[in-house]
Amino acid sequence: MSMKIDWLQGCATALVTPFNSAGAVDEKAFRVLVERQIKQGVRLLVPCGTTGESVTMTEEEDAHVIGMTVEVAKGRAHVIAGTGSNSTSTAIEYSQAARRLGVDAILVVAPYYNKPTQEGLYAHFRAIAESVGDLPVVLYNVPGRTSTNIAAGTVLRLARDVKNIAAVKEASGNLSQIMEILHHRPTGFRVFSGDDAVTLPLLSLGADGIISVVSNEVPDLMSRMVELALAGDWVEARNLHFRLLNLMEVNFIETSPGPVKAALALMGLIEEKLRLPLVPVQEKSRLKVREVLVELGLVKETSHAIA
C-alpha cells in the first residue's frame, strides 16, 4: 500500500528555468516566477523537470534551482524536485542531494536512451526509492521523450511493493493504460496527468491533479480549473478547460519548453533563452503564441518579446 499524502493533489507547475543573455540561470527571474506561482494559487512546484531543461544543467545548477525553490516556497508550497537520470546511480545521487535540500518529494523520469525492460524499470525505480528513506517518489512516464514506456503493470507493482512510491505523472497519451492504473491502483496512490489538454478528462476518471506546463503562464486559471474539477463542479471546470485549450495546445507547437518560454518572454517575465540543442521558436510560431496570449488578455496588442 502506498503512503497517503494529503497534500499530493491539485495543480503542480513544471517550472521553466530562465536563463540570462550569458546563458546562466537567471536567479532573479526564477525567484519572481516562483513567487508568482504561489501568489496565484499553485501549491505544488516542480523544478528541474523536462520543462526546466534539467538535462542541459549541471549538478550544481540543479541543486541551486531546487534550493531556490525550497527557499522561496518557505512552507507556502510543496516542492517536488526532478532528479531523474538514465543512470540509476546518478539518479540516486541527485535524489539524495534533493532530500538534503529539503524537498517534499522527488519526480523520477523513466531512463532515457538505455531502453530497459520492464524488470529493469522496476529495479531502477525501487533502488532510487529505497535510497531516500521515506521521501515520496513520483514516477514520470513520458515515452515520447524517453523511448521507454512504464507499463501499467509495472507502475502498479511498484505502487504496491514500495511504500514511498506515492504517485505517477502519466504523459504517455495512452488513455487505456492510464485508466488501468486508475482502476487498479492501491489506496493512497496518486495519479497526475502529464498533459494539460487531457487533465479534465482524467480528473473525471479519478485522477488527482496535473503537473502542468500551461500553469507557468496562467497559474491562477489552471489551478482554479483543477480545484473546480476536484470539487465536482464540472460545468465551471469545463468552461475554464475550453478557455485555456488553445494555450495548452500552442505550448507544444514546437518542442517544449520553447513555446512556453516564448510566451513568458512576451509577457515580460523572462528572456527567451534556451540551451542548445534547443533554440527559440520560429517567428511564425512566436506569432501564433502571441495571438493566443492576446486572446486571453495576457499581453496587449502592442506587446513585443524580450530580445
Image: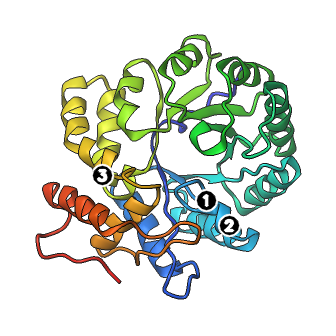
3D distance between C-alphas at marks 1 and 3 = 21 Å
Q: Answer with left or right where residue 76 lies relative to residue 219.
A: right
Whether 209 is drawn above or below 156: the answer is: below
Q: Which of 67 and 91 lies nearest the eye of the viewer?
A: 91
Residue 190, horizontal then vertical, whole percent:
57, 28
User: In the image, what residue type sits under mark 1?
Assistant: Cys
Callout 1 crowding tier (Cα within 10 Å): few <14, some 14–19, many ≥20: many
Are the residues flagged by discs 1 and 2 in contact, CB closer than 8 Å? yes
Quickly name the residue at label 1.
Answer: 48
Question: Which image quadrant: the C terminus?
Answer: bottom left
Q: Residue at x 51, y 33 (%)?
A: 192
Q: Residue at x 65, y 16 (%)?
A: 186
Q: Answer with left or right where residue 77 lies relative to residue 97.
A: left
Quickly name the residue at label 3.
Answer: 220
Label number found at residue 62: 2
3D distance between C-alphas at marks 1 and 2 = 6 Å
Residue 266, horizontal then vertical, whole percent:
28, 71
Secondary structure at badge 3 equals helix
Which colouring convention does the figure follow? rainbow
Q: Which image quarter: residue 158?
A: top right
Residue 10, horizontal then vertical, whole percent:
44, 38
Callout 2 crowding tier (Cα within 10 Å): few <14, some 14–19, many ≥20: many
Residue that extends furthest to the left in the rendered view of this protein: 301
Are the residues flagged by discs 1 and 3 in contact, CB closer than 8 Å? no
User: In the image, what residue type sits under mark 3?
Assistant: Asp
Whether 70 is drawn above or below 29: the answer is: above
Mark 1 vs mark 3: which is more N-terminal?
1
Question: Which image quadrant: the N terminus?
Answer: top right
Residue 196, horizontal then vertical, whole percent:
39, 40
Q: Which image quarter: residue 293?
A: bottom left
